[in-house]
Image (tube, rainbow, N blue to C red):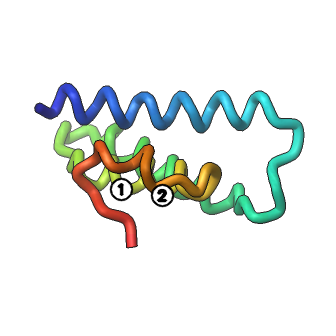
Amino acid sequence: MDRRRLYHVQNLAFEIMDEMNAVKQLDARVELKHVVDHLSRAIGSLADPSGTFSLDYVEEKVAEAHYSIFRNRKKLSCLKVILT
């Protein structure tokens, strides 16, 4: 189950990367500071030297970054986390 969740998180991260590289300038509605903040928190959690991380937390942060760019909740429906 975790493998599938990680696959979806990876997919969302790749979509973010593709969008950031494809578009020269994102709409004014996209706060890049928030996108970078959410992604860096997810990476920070995964890079914890103790080896403990919360997949729920990583999902939440990547989902929030993805939603900041795409504004599409349907793409996030496969995740365990629910954004408010």
Residues tagged 2 and 1 counted as in contact (Cβ below 8 A): yes
Q: Looking at the picture, how far across and down is residue 27, in whole percent? A: 82, 55
Q: Residue furthest bottom?
A: 84
Q: Looking at the picture, how far across and down is residue 18, in whole percent? A: 66, 28
Quadrant (top left/top right/bottom left/bottom right) for the N terminus: top left
Which residue corresponds to mark 1? 60
Residue 50 or 10: which is nearer the viewer? Answer: 10
Query: Residue placed at 72% from the left, 37% from the top?
Result: 20
Query: Residue placed at 69% from the left, 35% from the top?
Result: 19
Disc on res. 72: none
In the image: residue 3, left or right of residue 65: left
Query: What is the secondary structure assignment of the residue under circle 2?
Result: helix
Q: Residue furthest right?
A: 24
Query: Residue placed at 32% from the left, 39% from the top?
Result: 46
Which residue corresponds to mark 2? 64
- Give the residue type that dot 1 points to: Glu
**Res. 35 visible in picture:** no
In the image: residue 46, left or right of residue 38: left
Q: Looking at the picture, how far across and down is residue 7, in whole percent? A: 31, 27
**Res. 63 visible in picture:** yes
In the image: residue 53, left or right of residue 30: left
